[in-house]
Image (cartoon, coloured by chain):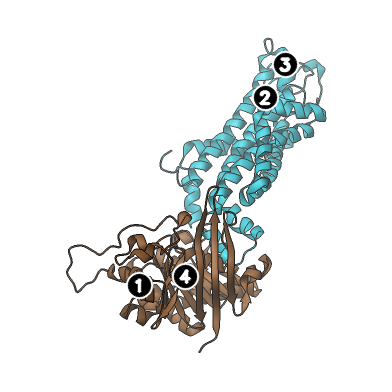
Chain colours: A brown, B cyan
Amino acid sequence: MEEVILEIKDLKTYFYSDKSVVPAVNGIDLLVRKGETLGIVGESGCGKSVTCLSILRLIPDPPGKIVGGQILFKGEDLLAKTEAEMRAVRGNSISMIFQEPMTSLNPVFTVGDQLSEAIRLHQGVAKKEAKQKAIDMLKQVGVPAPEQRAREYPHQLSGGMRQRVMIAMAISCNPDLLLADEPTTALDVTIQAQILEMMRDLKDRLGMAIILITHDMGVVAEMADQILVMYAGKAVECATVKTIYKNPMHPYTVGLLDSIPRMDVDVEKLHVIEGVLPDLSNMPEACCFEPRCPDARSICSQKEPDLEQVGDSLVRCWKYCPEWRQ
Amino acid sequence: MADIKSFVKFFKNPLSVIGALIISALVMAAIFAPVLATHPPNEIVMADKLAQPSPAHYFGTDEMGRDIYSRIVYGSRISLQVGMQVVGIAISIGVFTGAVSGYYGGWIDEIIMRITDMFLAFPSMILAMAIAAALGPSLSNAVIASSITWWPWYTRMVRSQILALREAEFVEAARASGNTMFGVIIKYILPNCLSPLIVQATMDVGFAIQLTAGLSFIGLGAQPPTADWGSMLSTGRKYMLTHWWYVTFPGLFIFLVVLGFNLLGDGLRDHLDPKLKNTA
């Protein structure tokens, strides 16, 4: 088994407003090994991005706060670090790619300046050397004519190019862990494929671990080794890609997989999971998916199930508990 | 290449050209004052007092026979200097307080904003008068007084810019790559609020000249015999009905310079703000 890069134990990140508390992430456990890709899937607002931002301790405080749990990065608890220590981690050993390549670059500096800036920030190399390294990085992420591109401003590049630049920036310090928050959502499909291909290639070459956040089941199937399905701030299913696609257990996972449009079957209407996410600030003491679940029984609205080992997967559902049959 | 193109484009607008011409003429006058002036600005020739405009005295002379044209030329130095100083001081205070206020938020923001509210609650002329009077009448005190009434505008502007930018993804990305708070403000936030700041500052130089001229007019700014446009207006007031040239020329130049800075500022805004580019 490869070395464990990141282990999260019972992470809880809450957001506080005047009237209520929103548990955006409510007890997540996960584990990522070196060279492995973990896909986190779930619909908008289920806590995927908050999990990522919690790892970097970038939750805006107030209103947000990490109220419990442990984030062990190579054995060290990130939650116990000071702000200065965290800055040395951010962008250096853990880096992040954001969803919107169009707005994630500083519009007033050239791409080359921004890249060498990131390199200088953590590696303390000379300006000239950093510039050269910036061009090398652009070449590595497949930007054509990197010398010329380095002199251009973000608005002169297309979305795909900008995302490449963001990735170049993220990997410029050889991070051990890359957090990719929906890196391809804003791109069109052909560019998506190229970017994913490149990320996979970089991962193999640099041996880093990736946490990939997405709501595109197709993208995780391509990229991930492990999948964590989140719903309303909690993990509802966790297993390897193969297991999940072959044998999805939680009704929510089943719903997600059924919602993928299929080329080979002619259907009138696409499958949808009825209903919306429950109000996070007002959660019942029951299974949070119960109101939308096609299989719900009376027990589901009475008690919350635990995350249990069933076969090769971890599932949070009454269906797989002995109580179900009563 | 792009810079030359945008330079050319800026001068396609005739109003910006007029503004730029007025301002460059002012700067030239200030630099080459000794060459352009026909007489020493403070030379008293009682024999020539209150002479009409003539080839010997382009704009006539004042009650002590000083050449008004030469005094206006030398006065451009004071006006320019005063305008720059007031805006410079106001920007330094405003950018700092605005950045702190906008980025940190919370109680510190609350305190700074309430202080600016207090300053903005007074008409700027009244407040400047009160401060200048309290400090004692002199040109540098007039500059200080004007700056003190001016900085809250910059604080508010910078703060609102920062509030918008603080949530921008590239700022979050900058933090995620390990920048310090200070580094984020200096490298990511301030450069992005530069263009509204430049526009505002350009226009404000004109208004600052006007405000300090106003203070000089009521005797709280430059003291005689300094060749200052505002104080020339003030002493010329007595002769307004009998000797029209005395007040007309200093007044005209204050008007032209304020107009010039406004036109230039407007031109810069149309040029720098892409949102307004096609609507104006």
Picture quarter containing residue A261? bottom left
Q: Is residue B131 left or right of residue A91?
A: right
Q: Is residue B71 visible?
A: no
Give me the C-alpha separation between circle 4 and circle 2. 65 Å
Nearer to me, B120 or A265: A265
- What's the amino acid at mark 3? Ala
Which residue, as the protein is rendered here, is positioned at the far bottom?
Answer: A1
- What's the amino acid at mark 4? Ala
Residue picked out by circle 2: B250
Q: Is residue B274 left or right of residue A85?
A: left
Image x and y of residue B238, in percent: 73, 13
Residue picked out by circle 3: B51
User: Which chain is mark 2 on?
Assistant: B
Residue picked out by circle 1: A324
Callout 2: SS: helix
Q: Nearer the viewer, mark 1 or mark 4?
A: 1
How many numbered discs, if any?
4
**Looking at the picture, do discs 1 and 2 lie on one chain?**
no
- What's the amino acid at mark 2? Pro
**Looking at the picture, do discs 3 and 1 lie on one chain?**
no
Marks 1 and 4, the one that precedes in the sequence:
4
Image x and y of residue B241, in percent: 67, 10
Q: Above or below — where is A209 with respect to A274? A: below
